[in-house]
Image (spheres, grey):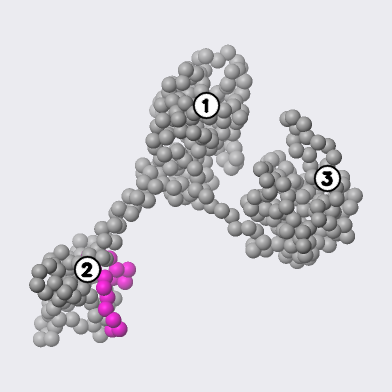
Amino acid sequence: MTTPAPVFTATESPGPGRPRPREFDWPQITATAPVLAATMRRYLEQLSLSLRPASVQRTDTMLRGFAGYLAANHPDVTALVDVERRHIEGFKRYLPTRAGKGGALSPQTIRMTLGTLRCCFERVSEWGYPDAPTRVLIFNGDLPTPDAPLPKFLSDVDAGKLMRAAAADVDMTRRLIIEMLARTGLRVGELCALPADAVVRMSQRHWLRVPVGKLHNDRYVPLHPQLVELLDAHQADRTDDLDRLIVWKGRPLNRHQITRILKRVAKTAGIGHVHPHQLRHTLATQAINRGMSLEAVAAMLGHKTLRMTLVYARVADQTVADAYDRVSDQVDAIYTKPAGLTTTGTGSVAMAQLAVEYEQRMLGNGWCNRPSQLDCQFESICESCAYYSTNTSFEPVLRAQRDHAAQHGQHQRVDLFQMLLDRDRPDTL
């Protein structure tokens, strides 16, 4: 059964440059559910004391969406304590019918909305609000599983084309903006907000001090000498007194200008559409591919945890290829025969069988087919067993095991295999 549409919406229509009208507003919600509205607004007031205004605004939008849904479809719910599980289930069915950017709400937005609601319910209960849910209403299973797409980055070829096009641009400010994004990994908002004194000199080199931003931490990013020259030239041409490191035509930079500048240079480079954040992804991928540690990449990008940086290790295709190449020889050894045995000429079938048996070691309930040149996580557990026995036919394998252990500095294994080789009982080596 389809959930009916809300019975009230904002009547003001948007005009050019004006924000989208609110679907639900607090005065309308208060008229139907006064206690619920008061609880949520009290909660929002507390959030405003610790979160950034943009974060509070997002939470406000999501709470109004839920409260408006209840007012429109369940007018009997006048307080948060009245909310039951069936109301949550109805809201879950309703969310995909709401309009978002470019169509219906995305699974990610739905997940964020339900997660925001759950956080609100849990906190008002923990804070002892009188109007709080009496039981858990939203569970992990209610939240859509998020996609984890790989960051979009430029290939080395396309990145080279972009940088050459930027270097050839007649406007030095456009070149400076592109190179700042590509060589520092700054977010667009961070680049726009850099103060005039952001460049400092420490330890015989220039650094860029990035102020407290999205993740509430500031950091220092090393500046390429070419960037220092471009910044000096930019400062020499300025006539304004704005407290900004980079200005565009006498005014502070904004993200829309940067997007247009990058679009123009990318078109000249012939690489299609490029988003500014792709340059951040590109720098991180290039750095990891060329051996920069995850810790250093995290410090450069301003990540709070390595978990944020690990996503770039997933896209570092050359790193993956190099790691694969390092183990490919060992993988190949699983499928190949010992070098000294051949299967050509007369008796090839018998020789092939001998090659297989040469690599086998009999165990208590079967055979171990691990080639002697490969490591074993259990090391020599079989050979050290009291029930293990061998004979002269296994001498080549035992010698290979001993030599392999010696090459890897595994002295206990060396002693074990040498003991087996030195045994003088008639039925053993």
Q: Residues within 10 Å of mark 2 (few under 14, many from 20)?
A: many
Which residue is at a point 10% across and 86% down the rendered structure image?
426
**Secondary structure category for the residue under label 1:** helix
Q: Using the image, tell me which numbered label, if any, was put on residue 9.
A: 3
- In the image, what residue type sits under mark 2? Ser
Q: State how many labels appear.
A: 3
Residue 53 in view of the camera? yes
Could you tell me residue 24's position as x and y percent? 81, 46
Which numbered disc flags the more N-terminal residue, 3 or 1?
3
**Residue in the picture at 79% in, 45% down:** 23
| Earlier sequence position, callout 3 versus callout 2 | 3
Label drawn at residue 37: none
Q: Secondary structure at mark 3?
A: loop
Q: Is residue 254 left or right of residue 222?
A: right
**In the image, which is nearer the foreground, mark 3 or mark 2?**
3
Q: Residue at x 81, y 52 (%)?
A: 5
Mark 1, residue position: 264
Q: Label 2: which residue?
A: 372
Residue 213 lies, in percent from the top left, at: 59, 37
Residues at marks 3 and 1 touching, judged by CB atoms closer than 8 Å: no
Q: Is residue 376 above or below residue 25?
A: below
Q: Amino acid at mark 3?
A: Thr
Q: Position of residue 114 (x, y in %)?
A: 69, 55
Q: Are marks 2 and 1 in contact (CB under 8 Å)?
A: no
> Is residue 376 found inside the magenta-colored segment of the image?
yes
Q: Which residues are magenta?
A: 364-379
Q: For this view, does 124 lie left or right of residue 190?
A: right
**Residue 49 sits in which quadrant?**
top right
Tag 1 or tag 2, which sits nearer the N-term? 1
- Can you tell which of label 2 and label 1 is closer to the viewer? 1
Residue closest to the eye, 283 or 20? 20
Distance, label 3 to label 2, CA atoms, is: 74 Å
